[in-house]
Image (cartoon, grey):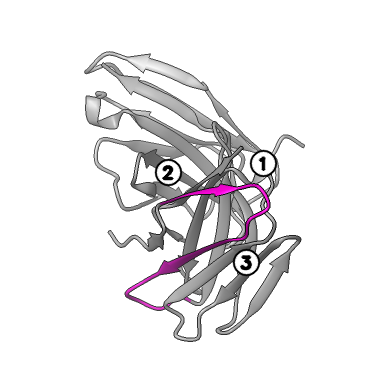
């Protein structure tokens, strides 16, 4: 089955740094989603994108729906310790009940 | 309002044993999903149910069966557990594909 490619696979940053990660697909999606998974918990939806080129923010998080519909980007500004976790992208198409998830980017903050 | 609940939280089985993972949601969602999460593999869909009384295979259905008992409950059964089924299992529910809410997960080890 298809999975989305996320990069980087892992990031080690210092508190206060900005973070950028991306997600690419070989096929187009009509919806892009970004989830965060805290250790020992289930994923939680952060941002949903519905239109090519759309830029949406949720606090310090900003995500973009790529123009080609085959990619999406997530930025975190001024990282804080609670940003630690795994970030997943997911793609969906209208009329399809299923999401396709990326392989995840693990974010670690170095004290 | 508990959201999505899963039982048990942890389980250890011997090869060949059977068990049922339980999932319930109190958000009146039509759709429910079962995923498994393995290191480096992201989330892979096992089965889903678009509405009460219907179930469909996802990406990795072999070795599993599901039952949509009613609108609230969606169970996942392993008839004869194998070590390859060692994983973390997540249940999710949604009104629409994009807003899937996840449970806390069941950590299953098959010896």
Q: Which residue is mark 2?
A: B35
Q: Secondary structure at mark 3?
A: strand
Circle 3 packing at 10 Å, graded few (<14), some (14-19), many (20+), is: many
| Residue A93 position within the rendered picture, expressed as x and y whole percent measured from the top left | 47, 73
Identify which residue, A111 or A79, lies in the foreground: A111
* Residue at which label 3 appears: A48
Q: Nearer the viewer, mark 3 or mark 1?
A: 1
Determine the chain carrying the residue at label 2: B
Answer yes or no: are tags 2 and 3 on the same subunit: no
Q: Residue at x 31, y 36 (%)?
A: B64
| Foreground of the two, B44 or B46 | B44
**Alpha-carbon span between mark 2 and mark 3:** 20 Å
Q: In front here: A59 or B42?
A: A59
Disc 2 element:
strand
Secondary structure under tag 1 reads: helix
Q: Is residue B101 left or right of residue B63?
A: right
**Towards the viewer: A106 or A24:** A106
Residue at (55, 84) in percent of width and height = A52
Mark 1 vs mark 2, CA separation in Å = 28 Å
Decide if residue A40 is on the left or right side of residue A69: right
The N terminus of chain B lies in which quarter of the figure?
top right
| Magenta region, residue range | A10-29
Badge 1 density bin: few <14, some 14–19, many ≥20, Cα 10 Å: few
Same chain assignment for discs 3 and 1? yes
Q: From what the image shows, is residue B109 above or below residue B48? A: above
The C terminus of chain B - image quarter: top left
As drawn, the label of residue A81 is: 1
């Amino acid at each position: 089955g298809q999975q989305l490619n996320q990069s980087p696979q892992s990031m080690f940053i210092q508190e206060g740094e900005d973070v950028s990660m991306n997600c690419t697909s070989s096929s187009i999606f009509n919806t892009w989603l970004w989830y965060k998974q805290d250790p020992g918990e289930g994923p939680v939806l952060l941002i949903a994108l519905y239109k090519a080129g759309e830029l949406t923010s949720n606090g310090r998080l900003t995500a973009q729906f790529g123009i080609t519909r085959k990619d999406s980007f997530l930025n975190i500004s001024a990282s804080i310790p609670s940003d630690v976790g795994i970030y997943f992208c997911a793609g969906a198409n209208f009329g399809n009940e299923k999401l396709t998830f990326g392989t995840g980017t693990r974010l670690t903050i170095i004290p | 309002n508990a959201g999505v609940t899963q039982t048990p939280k942890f389980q250890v089985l011997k090869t060949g044993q059977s068990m049922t993972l339980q999932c319930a949601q109190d958000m009146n969602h039509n759709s429910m999903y079962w995923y498994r999460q393995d290191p480096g593999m992201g989330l892979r869909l096992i089965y889903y149910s678009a509405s009460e009384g219907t179930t469909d295979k996802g990406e990795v259905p072999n070795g599993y069966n599901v039952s949509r008992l009613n609108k609230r409950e969606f169970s996942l059964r392993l008839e004869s557990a194998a070590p390859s089924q060692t994983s973390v299992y997540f249940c999710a529910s949604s009104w629409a594909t994009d807003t899937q809410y996840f449970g806390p997960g069941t950590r299953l080890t098959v010896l």
